[in-house]
Each structure stands twice: as C-alpha cells, then as structure tokens.
Image (cartoon, helix red, strand yellow):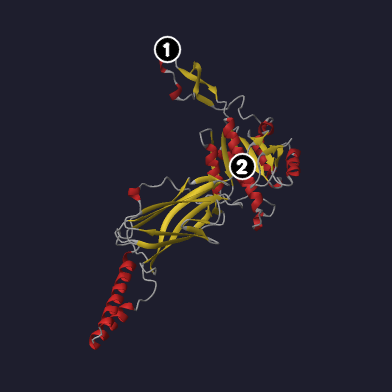
Amino acid sequence: MSFRTGRSLPSDRASEADEEPEPDDDPSLTAAIAASQIDLRPLFGGLLVLIGGVLGIPVLVMFGIVVLAIAWLHTIWARRALRRLRLERRFEPDRVMCGDTAHLVLTTWNRKLMPLPWLRAEEPVPSELRPAEGSGGLGWSFGPRSLVNGWTLGPYERTIRRIDLRAERRGVYRFGSVELAAGDLLGESVAEEDRQLAATLVVRPRTVPVRRFEAALERSGDLRARRGLVEDPSSFAGVRPYAPGDPVRHVHWRTTARLGVPVVKRFDPSRDRDVVVALDIETGDEGWAGRHDDDLAENLCVVAASLARALEAAGAAGGLAVAAFTGTTDRFAFLAPSAAEHQAARAGDLLARISPYPSAPFEHLLGRLARMVRPGTLIVIVSARDPGPWLAVGRRLTRSGFGVVHLAVGPRADDHARRSRAVRLRARPIRMDGDWRTVSHLDVAS
C-alpha cells in the first residue's frame, strides 16, 4: 500500500464483469489460506477412540468421536472460510477537497452456504485520513495506524458499511492489500489471507476567494484581451480577396463561384487570453540540498488552486505548470490552458499529485513554457522565494511578447515583489489570513 503517491490517476472503475475472479473461481490464484496452528486434535481423538475400544470404555469412544468431529469441522472451515467471499472497497466520492469528508464504502458478501462466525479485516491507513467523528463505530475501530473491521456473516449474507474519513492533507492516497482472518464456530482463527483491493482517493488542495486579482493583471493584460493574436473560427466577419498563403479550408466557395474570383472567409480575432499559473514549488534558496518547508509548499498549492478557480470564474482559459515530481518520467507537470468546464478541478487533481519539493530549477520551467504555450499568453508566477534565479528568464519572456506577473507568497513577499518590480516586472504580494489549514481568503496587495 502506498499513500500520497504521484502516479497517474486511474480511469473510471471497471464494470463488475471485469472484476478480478474470486479465489474459488480461479484455480491458479494462490491465496495464502491456512490453519493458524498445527492441529493435534485428530491424533488425540483417534487415540481416545482406540483406547476406549480396546478397554471397552464407551465414554472415551464417544469423547474421541466428538474430538474428531470438531477437528473435521475445523479443517472444513480452514479450507472454505474465505472461499467465495467477495470484499469490495471504494470511496464515494473518490475526489474531495482538503478538509472535506470522504466515505469509505466496504461491501462484504458471503456467497456460500457456510456461515462465517467472525471475519476480521485489517489495513493500514495514513494519519492524514482520520474518522470524522470519534475513534470508531459499530463493527470497526481505528488503531494508531490501521483500520480494523469485523463482521459476522450468515449464509449468502451481504453487508454494506460506510466509514466517514476526514481528509486532512492533499495527496493521492492509494490503498492495496487487506489482511483477512476468519474463525470457526468455536471462535478459533482458522484461515488468513492477503487480498488486493485497489482503491484511490484524490485529495485536492483547498480553494478560497481571491480578492483584487484583476488589479494584479491590469498592466500586463486583462483576463479578456482587447485584441487577439489568433482568429476565432466561430466569429464570422465577412469575406476578403484571396491572398497567397491563405488556407484552402477558408475559401468561401459559393461567393467565389458567384464573383468569379477567389475569396476567403474573414474572422474576428479571438478575445480569449490564455493564462498559465506557473507554480514555483521550491520554498527556499537551498532546495537543491533537499531542504524545504512543507507547510509553505502547501500554502503555495492553496494559492495556485485558488487562482485556477478564480480564472475559471472569470471565463479565462486557465492552465497550470509546475516543476515537481508526479510519479511519471516527466519532470514537469503541465495542464494546457482551457476555458472548458471543470478546468479548476483538473488543476486541483494535478496539484494533489505533485511532490512538495522541486524536480528541476524553476527557471528551466519558465524557459520551457515559451515553447509550450502560444504567444501572448499571460504567465502568472506564484513563488515564495527570492526571484533572483529566474528574473532574467522572466524579462526574456516579456520581450518575446508574453505577459508576466509575479505574485509573491510567504513572510518576505513584499521584499520579493519589490525586487521583481526593480527590473520592470509586474509584481504583487499575496496576503493570507492564515495557513493552508485555516485561510479563508487571499488578498492581492497593492
């Protein structure tokens, strides 16, 4: 089992027809089902029957038969207790925001005639996921680092249990194996098994309102540009004479046939402006030495997620870029600018996957952005450290036609913003009325 990993998110769950077969349905599946200890009762019962028969003592014979019957039942339960037992685990919903509650749904189904006097399932649970109320419930309890569930199942009985877990930190939490143990009618543990039950919970960073965000962008460009560099094919504005180099697909064939000269369609320029939030996840000037402030990194993620939400609310085509590990081979995480619905949620998913420390220098990310986004894109840099290492790259971006805005975060935000303004970059500090756990809004200071 792994927690807070950065691997790619799983696709939608497969249907029940695609589920893995149960141990009794797949002979090749080697389930670790065995008796918990060596049982000497068959030997003891056989000796009692033998001695009672030789000595002519019916009581010893009957007692030996009872011992043999108990040993036989013990063997039957040891072999079949966990057969045809279906155990499912899922989260509803499987994507939540930090501080919200996720419902862990456990479904157990005893698909055989043999009852289960007791069934126990134990699995490790990260400290960032804790029960919403109290420390346990009916049939389940939380240990220091584990969740323990218990059931009593009759023949063909099916139960569904919901456990409310509060997500206290962002991340991608992946659950794997569960330790199962079952007992017989005498209460003895007769079978054990490690069963794989894959489930994933994505915890996005919190989003809070951003005040005066437009004021930070007024001199570098509004969220909606007055003049676009790219034509909008949905805004037809008439026709004009054909010029060498015009694409054939823009030829207006009906007007060309009527006038006898080739003409092409003319469109209004696109007024949407792409905005990319470039997150500098490095929290200090010695990030190369493996030093980072985890709480400050979480503050940066909250700021980036809140900006993505503000851009979506304003109707801008927002994107996100960060140089951090996500469990893939690429050192850079990038979400292309888009004005589509739920773009802020996609940014939250990306922020949930990233590590709290950088995978490459931030200036390398800025240099790469110039080749990944179209000219005229507004790049909003969110950083909590001295901008000195990337100021030269920021100035080159402005000379290349990109808009650059520096939003400084952290205790020295005023000093960092002042240094960016010294080289004629637009910069504003961001005030937070608390840390990432308690902040209620972000304020873009003047």
Residue at 50% across, 16% down: 238
- Give how far across and how far down residue 359 sits, in percent: 59, 52
**Residue 260's disc number:** 1
- Give how far across and how far down residue 172 sits, in percent: 52, 51
The residue carrying mark 2 is 304
Left or right: 63, with 435 as reference point: left
* Near-viewer residue (72 or 176): 72
In the picture as drawn, the residue positioned furthest to the bottom comes out as 55
C-alpha span from label 2 to label 1: 55 Å
- Give how far across and how far down residue 404 sits, in percent: 66, 36
In the picture as drawn, the residue positioned furthest to the top comes out as 259
As drawn, 324 above or below 236: below
As drawn, 4 above or below 249: below
Secondary structure beneath label 2 = helix
Residue at 59% across, 30% down: 314
- Give how far across and how far down residue 119 sits, in percent: 40, 62
Q: Which amino acid, mark 2?
A: Ala
